[in-house]
């Protein structure tokens, strides 16, 4: 907000505060319903700022003040009446970083509905003033970062959440009556003792971190207790109530006494390097989650967790080198143990003794050892028979035989990715092993043998082998797996896949072979499998043999896209045959130059076929046979495209080059054709004649050097035509150009060089609804010549077309046009005949022209117009009767006619009784409203624009008060705050 010197008394303002006759409104305040925010103000300024926003304020629930000066804060007064009719109910009050120091008991007494008071980062020293507060239940108080030294709980009655952190509290006075709080934050104070029994209180969420506690006495159940910080490590005992327990406990030391923790005990020994746990101080804690992560621990003493009863033990991100001690007790029931990223080089099977001894067979055990330096692990399932999930990824394992899976009957997920394994012996998975998911990605494997997974092929569901060095997949490598669903072999070095490599896979969904070195796709590589998604992209494939993808009845997506140097020359006959469920086929960037007949046949569900960026010059008959295609993408086509009558195709997106000859595209069923990014030398007559069902024709980013006269012959079904690029170099539209298009509904010829439209140009377009001719070079337009013969035309757009003269013929019948756009032209004059035949017009755009006068009865025949734009013209006169005929007008914009009211303050609006929105910004208006008669004359007005006019500030203020009192919105669409203004509406002092 700028600083504005107001020289007149503001009625109502003096009811709030006494001020000098001349005053300065500095600082910054903004209102965004229902919040009023200020910065850099004083207490007196606040009331003035509120009053200045009165006209745009309809409700006020929060006041937010920061970085201001309230050092001599006084009791607030009730300003709700003075902001009427706005609804004022202050629920949230913030005054932060504003030098608040001495607060009295009646400072905030006027705020009867407070839910939260925020006075953080000030200079408050005591809490005595809190007794004068009026507040609702669940009240929140933030007094953090002040200078309070004494806490009296009698001052905090009935509050819900209290922030008193970062003060100087060392003295606590008890409550006279028992009080319960939801949340109290007392971090970073100077407390030595804290006893809820002595203070007669109970706190559900309590944070006492970073104090100097030596004694802590708590009662009843807690949802959260935090006592972090080394200053608290001398606490001898926690809790004296028989029923005491805590749900979440965060501590930087191990309590001496036993605790019942419902959810998590988080040990957070901050800023301690290579901590050694005290073997003489074993935790006796019952908790669902026992979290010792990220503590730089280097050792766990013998039997350290013997009394811990937890289901999740997190020891990740520590510094263990060797774990050999037996640390768990006989009744341990851990189901998840996380030792990841803890620098472990060796872990003895004795470490896991008893770790899950009480875990029921109904519970599965998860062990995470990822991100360490392990080279081997032995007998883990002997100690943890219920082990289901074992993660050994990112270690230093070189031989999978070093991982003993003896007795791993329940093991379902096995991750040994990102190690140094180069070989998997055939008998690796012997015995009663039922692994469903195995991840051996990011190793050094060279081969996968038929017998590699033979012992688990009846149960295996997912195999991840990406980022290895596999060279070949032999015949029957993946044969006869009953439940296998996902095979990931991406990012290997596979050059050859033998026939039947993938066979008899009844449950397979995904085969990922992307980013390999595959050059030839053999016949029957995939045999009798249920695969849905095959990814072969980024392989140097140059040969797809017959029936390479035949009879894959369930495949939905097939991606062979290639961005590598080697290319495919030919797609063989029946290469893609009988793929009954194939949805997506991507053959882009393969360098294909020849496709044999029947290469694509018996495929009924294709949504998209991408053949872009190949060397295909045309499509011969029978390449596609008995195929249904949603969308076909082709580019660099210079020869004809022919589909036989068994091919049903909905949409084709194509790039053409050279001459597009007669019957260039032939398809009985094609409905939508988009020609994009093309350079066409010539469109010849009848080039689209063999497209009897085509409904939409679009040309996008296409250059056409020349066209013959009858290129649209045969397009009898077309409903949408964007011919802008076809006529971009044409200067005239000849008669009968569209004579065959009896079903056309939308015609677009925009941003072209047209300067002439001949008579009968649009003859035959009996169903045309929208005609877009914007952005042409039409100087003179006869509206009758365009609309005659178009009985269904509803929209006519002639904007930005260099029009200087627009007229209507004396002879002609009324049309049905409802939307007419003549904006952004050079029209200087309209007369009573211009819109004579536009009796059904609803919306008329005439903005951004050169109109200087609105003639008498210009709109007399357009009685149905509801929206009229005349802004940004040079209108200086609107005579009485200028708006005659506009009895139903709802919206009028006559802004930016800079001399409209220079000589007169009156405008002939008498007939505009139904007007709802009026813009007269920047029209040199000095006095507009007759307060006595305005709402009577215009009872429906709800919005008015009056900005950028030379209003006297005093008159403007009166005008805004009048508008506000009558519920009329005057918010400017382009507010100006860098000049004298009220709420962005400018004025002159």
Image: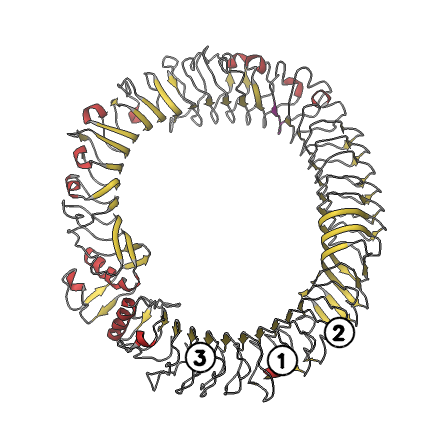
User: SS at mark 2?
Assistant: strand
Where does label 1 land, which residue? 786
The label nearer to you, 1 versus 3, is 3
Nearer the camera: disc 1 or disc 2:
1
Q: Residue at x 48, y 18 (%)?
A: 334
Part of the protein shown in magenta: 412-419
Mark with earlier residue (1, 3): 1
Query: Which residue was labeled with disc 2?
Result: 707
Left or right: residue 10 versus residue 562 is left
Q: What whole-number distance in Å separates the C-alpha atoms at marks 1 and 2?
A: 23 Å
The image position of residue 981, as x and y in percent, is 30, 69
Labelled disc at residue 886: 3
User: Which is more N-terminal, label 3 or label 2?
Assistant: 2
Give the overall secondary structure of the magenta segment: loop
User: With respect to residue 294, does 386 lie above or below?
Assistant: above
Q: Tell me how far mark 2 sits from mark 3, CA to CA.
A: 45 Å
Residue 106 locus on image (x, y percent):
14, 47
SS assignment at label 3: loop
Q: Residues within 10 Å of mark 2 (few under 14, many from 20)?
A: some
Which is in the foreground here, disc 2 or disc 3?
A: 3
Q: From the viewer's perspective, is residue 370 above or below residue 784?
A: above
Disc 3 packing (10 Å; few <14; some 14–19; many ≥20): many
Decide if residue 652 is on the left or right side of residue 12.
Answer: right
Specify whether residue 534 is painted magenta: no
Give the percent coordinates (x, y) of residue 95.
Answer: 25, 49
């Amino acid at each position: 907000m700028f600083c504005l010197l107001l020289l007149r008394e503001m009625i109502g303002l003096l009811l709030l505060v006494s001020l000098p006759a001349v005053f300065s409104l500095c600082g910054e305040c903004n209102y965004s319903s229902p919040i009023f925010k200020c910065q850099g103000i004083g207490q007196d300024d606040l009331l003035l700022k509120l009053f200045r926003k009165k006209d745009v304020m309809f409700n006020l629930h929060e006041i937010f003040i920061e970085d201001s000066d309230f050092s001599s804060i006084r009791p607030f007064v009730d300003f709700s009446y003075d902001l009427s009719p706005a609804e004022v109910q202050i629920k949230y009050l913030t005054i932060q970083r504003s030098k608040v120091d001495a607060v009295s008991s009646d400072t905030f007494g006027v705020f009867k509905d407070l839910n939260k008071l925020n006075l953080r980062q000030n200079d408050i020293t005591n809490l005595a003033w809190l007794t004068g507060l009026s507040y609702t239940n669940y009240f929140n108080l933030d007094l953090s970062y002040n200078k309070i030294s004494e806490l009296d709980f009698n001052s905090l009655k009935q509050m819900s959440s209290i922030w008193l952190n970062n003060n100087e509290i060392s003295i606590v006075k008890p409550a006279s009556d028992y009080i319960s709080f939801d949340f109290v934050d007392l971090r970073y104070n100077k407390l030595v003792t804290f006893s809820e029994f002595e203070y007669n209180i109970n706190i559900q969420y309590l944070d006492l971190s970073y104090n100097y506690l030596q004694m802590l006495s708590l009662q009843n159940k807690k949802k959260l207790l935090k006592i972090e910080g080394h200053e608290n490590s001398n606490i001898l005992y926690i809790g004296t109530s028989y029923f005491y327990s805590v749900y979440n406990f965060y501590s930087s030391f191990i309590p001496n006494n036993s605790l019942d923790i419902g959810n998590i005990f988080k040990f957070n020994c901050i800023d301690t390097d290579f901590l050694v746990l005290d073997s003489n101080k074993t935790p006796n804690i019952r908790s669902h989650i026992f979290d010792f992560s990220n503590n730089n621990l280097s050792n766990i003493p013998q039997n350290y967790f013997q009394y811990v009863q937890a289901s999740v033990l997190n020891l990740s991100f520590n510094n263990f080198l060797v774990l050999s001690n037996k640390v768990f007790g006989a009744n341990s029931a851990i189901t998840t143990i996380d030792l990841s990223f803890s620098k472990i080089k060796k872990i003895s099977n004795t470490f896991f003794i008893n770790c899950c001894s009480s875990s029921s067979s109904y519970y599965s055990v998860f062990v995470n050892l990822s991100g360490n330096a392990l080279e081997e692990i032995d007998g883990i399932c002997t100690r943890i028979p219920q082990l289901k999930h074992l993660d050994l990824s990112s270690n230093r394992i070189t031989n999978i035989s070093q991982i003993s899976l003896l007795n791993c009957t329940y093991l379902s997920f096995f991750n040994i990715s990102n190690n140094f394994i180069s070989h998997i012996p055939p008998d690796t998975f012997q015995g009663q092993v039922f692994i469903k998911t195995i991840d051996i990605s990011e190793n050094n494997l060279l081969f996968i043998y038929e017998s590699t997974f033979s012992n688990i092929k009846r149960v295996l569901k997912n195999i991840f082998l990406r980022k290895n060095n596999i060279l070949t997949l032999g015949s029957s490598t993946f044969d006869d797996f009953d439940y296998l669903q996902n095979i990931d072999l991406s990012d290997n070095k596979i050059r050859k896949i033998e026939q039947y490599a993938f066979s008899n896979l009844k449950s397979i969904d995904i085969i990922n072979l992307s980013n390999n070195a595959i050059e030839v796709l053999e016949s029957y590589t995939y045999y009798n499998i249920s695969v849905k998604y095959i990814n072969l992209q980024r392989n140097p494939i140059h040969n797809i043999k017959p029936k390479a993808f035949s009879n894959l009845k369930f495949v939905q997506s097939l991606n062979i896209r290639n961005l590598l140097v080697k290319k495919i020359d030919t797609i063989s006959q029946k290469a893609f045959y009988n793929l009954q469920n194939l949805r997506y086929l991507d053959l882009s960037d393969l360098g294909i130059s020849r496709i044999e007949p029947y290469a694509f046949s018996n495929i009924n569900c294709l949504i998209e076929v991408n053949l872009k960026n190949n060397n295909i010059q045309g499509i011969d008959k029978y390449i596609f046979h008995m195929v249904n295609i949603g969308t076909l993408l082709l580019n660099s086509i210079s020869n004809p495209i022919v589909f036989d009558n068994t091919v049903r195709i909905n949409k084709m997106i194509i790039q053409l080059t050279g001459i597009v000859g007669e019957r260039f595209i032939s398809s009985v069923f094609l409905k939508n054709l988009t020609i994009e990014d093309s350079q066409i030398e010539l469109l010849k007559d009848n080039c689209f004649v063999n497209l009897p069902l085509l409904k939409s024709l679009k040309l996008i980013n296409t250059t056409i050097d020349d066209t013959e006269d009858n290129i649209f012959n045969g397009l009898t079904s077309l409903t949408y035509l964007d011919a802008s690029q076809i006529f971009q170099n044409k200067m005239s539209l000849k008669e009968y150009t569209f004579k065959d298009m009896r079903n056309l509904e939308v015609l677009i010829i925009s941003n072209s060089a047209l300067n002439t439209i001949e008579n009968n140009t649009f003859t035959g377009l009996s169903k045309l609804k929208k005609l877009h001719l914007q952005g042409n070079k039409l100087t003179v337009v006869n509206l009758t010549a365009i609309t005659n013969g178009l009985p269904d035309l509803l929209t006519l757009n002639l904007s930005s077309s260099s029009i200087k003269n627009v007229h209507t013929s004396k002879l002609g019948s009324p049309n049905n046009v409802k939307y007419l756009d003549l904006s952004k032209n050079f029209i200087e004059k309209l007369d009573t005949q211009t819109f004579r035949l536009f009796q059904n017009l609803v919306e008329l755009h005439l903005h951004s022209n050169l109109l200087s006068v609105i003639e008498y009865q210009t709109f007399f025949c357009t009685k149905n117009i509801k929206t009229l734009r005349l802004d940004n013209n040079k209108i200086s006169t609107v005579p009485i009767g200028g708006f005659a005929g506009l009895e139903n007008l709802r919206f009028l914009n006559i802004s930016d006619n800079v001399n409209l009211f220079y000589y007169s303050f009156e405008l002939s609006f008498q007939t505009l009784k139904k007007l709802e929105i009026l813009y007269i910004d920047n029209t040199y208006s000095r006095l507009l409203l007759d307060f006595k008669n305005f709402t009577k004359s215009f009872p429906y007005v709800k919005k008015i624009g009056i900005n950028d006019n030379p209003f006297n500030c005093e008159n403007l203020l009166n005008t805004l008060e009048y508008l506000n009192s009558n519920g009329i919105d005057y918010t400017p669409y382009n507010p100006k705050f860098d000049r004298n203004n009220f709420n962005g509406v400018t004025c002159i002092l």
